[in-house]
Image (tube, helix red, strand yellow):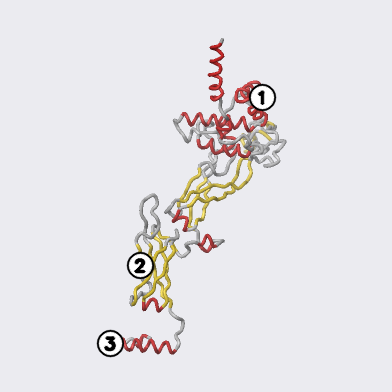
Amino acid sequence: MQFLRILLLVVFPLLVAAAPDFYKILGVDKQASDRELKKAYKQLSKKYHPDKNPGNEEAHQKFIDIAEAYEALSNQESRQVYDKYGYDGYKQHQQGGGNQHGGHHDPFDLFSRFFGGGGHAGHGHGQRRGHNMEVKVSVPLKDFYVGNRIEFQVTKQQICEECEGSGSRDGHSEKCEHCAGRGARIVKQMLAPGIFQQMQVICDKCGGKGSRITNPCPVCQGARVVKKPVSHWLDVDRGVPDGMRVSFENEADESPDWVAGDLIIQIDERNPADSANKENLDGWWFRRRGKDLIHKEVLSLREALLGDWSRNLTHLDGHEVKLGRKKGQVIQPGHVDVIKGQGMPLWQEDGYGDLIVEYTVVLPDQMQSGMRKDIEAVFEKWRKKVGVNVKDEL
């Protein structure tokens, strides 16, 4: 007898520890709202879906556990039972008919209620796949240089959370009386006197669904889907090419009738003229050309002719690049300097491209007579010294 007591003291804690913790499985706390539960389920079910992890039994089991945890906690009655009596109490409640599934659940059916389609390729052969969505996201050049993680929004069609895609307030629908639930009707068409042709057409009363909703959902009005903005995070890597396309799997328009396609994001460099605030104007004095950066530097006539100038160019990450000329060094209009290693970082490689500095010389619109005479005198003195007549060029 004493041995049995000791055995129970040892085994019972192990059994309790081995029982699934639904909150831990979903990564939420016990006060999690319905919205937080749905968000956790969506993220985890996509991460561990068998189609994404072929041959991985551990991921497959996690996918099943995630579905069971969500079904338990998303139902108010079963959640209360689980919170009060734990996993064993929840299972007894399920087996006693406390759930419409009678204690059994299909994780792929649950997945399809959220994302449309038949759950995965092995369920429902011939299941349609929705169209991909393509969206352009404009990013300032600075983010291409230093890298960034940005949030963006996309308005898309989503399965109604209120009715879980049924379109019905109470989750029920009635068989269409016009097509007897087949979704199609046989009609006769007379081709000639006494000659008829039978044709099968989609039922115009139920739209081919075979059922009709008599008590529509107050949120989607029976449409089963709603248009809502969805936020996503986009990682912009250093040096990523302009026009790069990034795919978010199964994040396009949702429907109970198809598997959601992919959301494809094209990362484009933002035109500085389109920037709404000064913060996004950082680096507007640079242009990108592949792995190189282009900068136009404006010089006065004095600087171009006499040299003896220097200035610091603030780069996209804040470091300074020194530009300048010594006294007497002339810069011709259109002259180009190439500064090695000061261009764009090479994507997924070590090193940088080059910074190409193009010089523009600003000439005065009009020269005052005194200044003109002084310049003529200088040029005349230079002409006599070197034997070149430049007076006619003024």
Q: Residues within 10 Å of mark 1 (few under 14, many from 20)?
A: some
Q: Residue at x 41, y 87 (%)?
A: 372
Tell me the amino acid under the disc marked 2.
Asp
Quadrant location, the C terminus: bottom left
Q: Is residue 281 visible?
A: yes
Q: Find disc 2 in the rendering and name its residue.
A: 337
Secondary structure found at label 1: helix
Secondary structure found at label 3: helix
In the rendered structure, which disc, 1 or 3, sits on the residue that comes first in sequence? Answer: 1
Foreground mark, 1 or 3, reads 3
Q: Find disc 1 in the rendering and name its residue.
A: 98
On the picture, is 86 further left or further right than 378? right
Secondary structure found at label 2: strand
The front one of 360 and 52 is: 360
Tell me the amino acid under the disc marked 1.
Gly
Q: Find disc 3 in the rendering and name its residue.
A: 385
Tell me the amino acid under the disc marked 3.
Lys
Quadrant location, the N terminus: top right
In the rendered structure, which disc, 3 or 2, sits on the residue that comes first in sequence? Answer: 2
Asked if residue 2 is positioned above or below residue 315 in the image, the reply reads above
On the picture, is 133 further left or further right than 294? right
Task: Tell whether label 3 touches label 1 (CB within 8 Å).
Answer: no
Residue 386 at x, y percent in the picture = 27, 85
The front one of 18 and 47 is: 18
Farthest front residue?
Answer: 2
The answer for how far apart the CA atoms under marks 2 and 1 are is 78 Å
